[in-house]
Amino acid sequence: KWLSSNSWKGLQCRLPSEAEWEYVARAGTTPKYPSDLQNGMHSNTWEWVQDRWHDNYQGAPVNGSAWESGNNHRRVLRGGGWGSSPNDMRSAFREEGDPDSGGLNTGFRVVCSSLFAR
């Protein structure tokens, strides 16, 4: 909300859903490990997504939107950080974290509405 209210007029920005993050990370492919692209989404920093943490995907939205329901305060992190093991950098790997805490290898990307979609 802060970003949307302080960015370009009328541009809505938010964290991606977990499904959106994985879709972009895989870039239309199904590899176990990411490519060696310099601007890839793996192994730079753990990235927050909007979804609340659930142990599995049973009951998750099927339309790609963020899974906001549930009593768990913790949120999902994706991508693996610079100190992560190779297993943690798989496209499908996910971790949980407390959104009120931070770290040297934790960050985020934003999804913004297109100015041309209006």
Image (spheres, grey):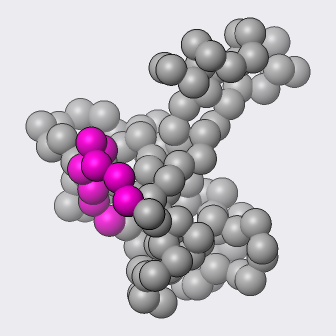
Which span is picked out in magenta?
95-103
The answer, for residue 40, to whether it is visible in the render is yes
Residue 101: say if magenta: yes
Number of numbered discs:
0
Coordinates of residue 85 in the picture (x, y in percent)? 42, 88
The answer, for residue 92, to whether it is visible in the render is no
Coordinates of residue 30 in the picture (x, y in percent)? 62, 76
Secondary structure mostly taken by the magenta-highlighted segment of the chain:
loop
- Is 118 situated above or below 20? above
Q: Is residue 111 left or right of residue 94?
A: right
**54 or 13, which lies in front?**
13
Q: Residue at x 78, y 76 (%)?
A: 37
Q: Residue at x 70, y 26 (%)?
A: 113
Residue 53: say if magenta: no
Quadrant containing the C terminus is top right
Picture quadrant where residue 40 is located: bottom right
Looking at the image, the residue that sits furthest to the right is 116
Coordinates of residue 21 in the picture (x, y in percent)? 56, 54
**118 or 47, which lies in front?**
47
Q: Is residue 12 left or right of residue 87?
A: right
Q: Residue at x 54, y 31 (%)?
A: 14
Picture quadrant where residue 4 is located: top right
Looking at the image, the residue that sits furthest to the bottom is 86
Picture quadrant where residue 103 is located: bottom left
Coordinates of residue 39 in the picture (x, y in percent)? 76, 66
Q: Is residue 5 left or right of residue 67?
A: right
- Is 80 situated above or below 115? below
